[in-house]
Amino acid sequence: MTKAPVLILGARSDIGKAIAHKFATLGHPIQLAARAVETLEPEKVDIELRHQIAVTLHEFDALAPGTHESFISELPALPCIAVSAIGFMGDQPVNEKNPAIAIEVMRSNFEGPANILGALANHFVVRGSGTLVGISSVAGERGRATNYIYGSAKAGFTAFLSGLRNRLTKLDVHVVTVLPGFVATQMTEGMDLPARLTAQPSEVADAIALAVEKKQNVIYVRPIWRFIMLIIRNIPEQIFKRMKI
Amino acid sequence: MKVSGWGRYPVLEATVHAPRSEHALREMIKSTPNLIARGNGRSYGDSAINRSATIQLRHFNRMIAFDSKTGQLVAESGVLLADIITAFLPRGWFPIVTPGTKFVTLGGMIAADVHGKNHHKDGSFEKCVDWIEIVDANGEVIRCSRHENVALWEWTIGGMGLTGVILRAAIRLRSVETGWIKQTTIPAQNLVAAMSVFEKSQDATYSVAWIDCLGTGEQLGRSLVMLGEHVKNANLGQKQANAPFDTNTERKLSIPLDFPSWSLNRFSIRAFNALYYWNGLRKPSEQIVDWDSYFYPLDAILGWNRIYGRKGFAQFQCVIPLEQSRAGLTELLEAISKAGAGSFLAVLKKFGKQESLFSFPMDGYTLALDFPINKTTLQLMEHLDGIAISHGGRFYLAKDSRMTAQTLRASDNRSADFATMREDSDLRNAFQSAQSERLDI
């Protein structure tokens, strides 16, 4: 039996690639979507060779919401699972001073991913099935001085996913919110991250596949992050505002 | 950051780059005064470390093409052997030559010209390589093979990454009917008996011996010789034959902490050795085992290098030419057993003939043993170096972490040619590892 395809939005990212490999291992055809998608040709060949499934490439710009509906209608098949691995952290000091870049960070982490998942949701509802996976961030759980522009956009995306899940549950469409803690990717390259708290992209992919299968709602990849964020969310603002965290 | 090889000795402070595109890699090579490529860090010592610029190739891990008629795979050099097996064993293909771990990269296997349990029959890794693409010091990609840029090809095989950065290669896989191996275990009372089993087993596809380093006198070199053959589908039971590649080898064990180094004192080693030996004897002399347990028994214990403690360990691996093997191995085993520092793991294997410019194997016997790092074992290994050299032996650079330049020169007269070639081709300044500096090559 041929399985239905899995769509990866933001397929150039390390997490996006790892998710593509994971679902290919499970026998799903893969749709890779990104800007300048033709440069993902080597990934397409690699995934097809390793897993003996078909991979298709689709030009996609998260920041061009007007194109999202036609992007979906041009897919060769409506996917059974769509994953957004779209994101852009930027550099906080730069984000603070350069409004154009700050807005790009906000749009890349909230507007773009929310709009495309919302559009896909409507198609999934018509079909009456499907799973939407949004990779948000623990940075959206509480704004911190070191990355609140990125974090606030992720907070918006997390809230969007929560609402989407609330709306779609009775319509048999499932929504998974992924709040990975630190992940060793291009985005975090050069940062000095504690090894015990840092997941590999393949761990994120494994956790997502499991969450889709078990219909989990909100996952943190490494369980310790659920505990860390519980504490961080509960620190009184009087104290939090003076903390260096 | 701190970088070390599999032996976790030496640990060096090095700047590590992990370029993401071919363009970035080529620019980096062009603009960096000297560097060395690094794969998955499974060479034991400092072969893949350059303090000022270690170039990690983990982003070059894509497979490019596979020809199901010839079994030829084209892939980037950072692809792991484990991934090749995962992808192609279910389709009936297995590596022609494999080292004792599957967590090595394609580039690393070429650079070290690794060997396996079938060296006596199939030669070293070089035998299954069709061509290699290398980035030279100018950032240019050069393809070499037995027919094209032949000198570069010959020096790159076993050249420890010192001729350029291996970027892509084409290798051939062997067709197999199942993922199972028929293993025959033959106990040998001592070294002479073990060597005689090897001589009589020239036709076996795979052969290797586990050797008890603490045996003395009549029991010096007592061994279990293990022969192996790929099992044909017709020889499997019905259940296995229905899924001949489904060997169900999920691995779980891992060593999360450093063992204190005293846990490997001579008593625990003696107990371990005796147990293994007798356990082996009691087993039926013939059994069907899955490919993973047969080829990669230690891969089952992820992070087994930590068992030697925080200070790390070194592996001594030499090959002694055939005519002097018996005398040389006897002297080596006597020295090891006298020191009582015999290792957790000691492996004996008969190599076949090999003519290469700088590869390790030659017609003779190879002995490999691990030692936890301390003053005594470092001295013992130097003593062993001398014994091997006096019998015409040489050493495996992929395992080396402590040999001196003088030892290398004395053991291998090809090393001077290698150094001259590097000098003449302006490679000496472009590609350097901590090992190549130490060994002055």
Image (spheres, rainbow, N blue to C red):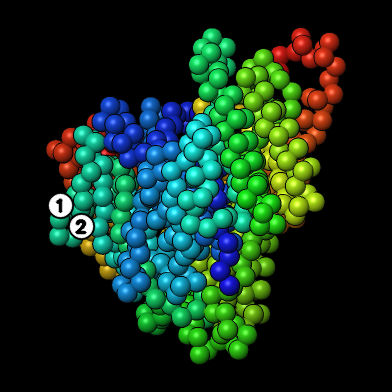
Residue indicated by mark 1: B149
* In the rendered image, residues at marks 1 and 2 fall on the same chain: yes
Q: Residue at x 74, y 27 (%)?
A: A141
Please determine whether, in this image, residue A228 is positioned above or below residue B74: above
A63 and B417: which one is in front? A63
Please determine whether, in this image, residue B81 is positioned above or below residue A62: below
**Label number found at residue B145:** 2
Q: Is residue B385 visible?
A: no
Three-letter code, disc 2:
Ser
Please determine whether, in this image, residue A195 is positioned above or below residue A5: above
Q: Residue at x 36, y 39 (%)?
A: B21
| Residue A63 % position (x, y) | 51, 31
| Residue A33 % position (x, y) | 48, 45
Q: Is residue B425 visible?
A: yes
Element type where label 1 sits in the image? loop
B64 and B144: which one is in front? B64
Three-letter code, disc 1:
Asn
Quarter residue A129 falls in: bottom right
Direction from residue A109 to residue A236 in the image, left or right: right
Q: Residue at x 47, y 41 (%)?
A: A60
Q: Are marks 1 and 2 in contact (CB under 8 Å)?
A: yes
Q: Residue at x 66, y 80 (%)?
A: B282
10 Å neighbourhood of mark 1: few (<14), some, or many (≥20)? few
| Residue B84 % position (x, y) | 45, 61
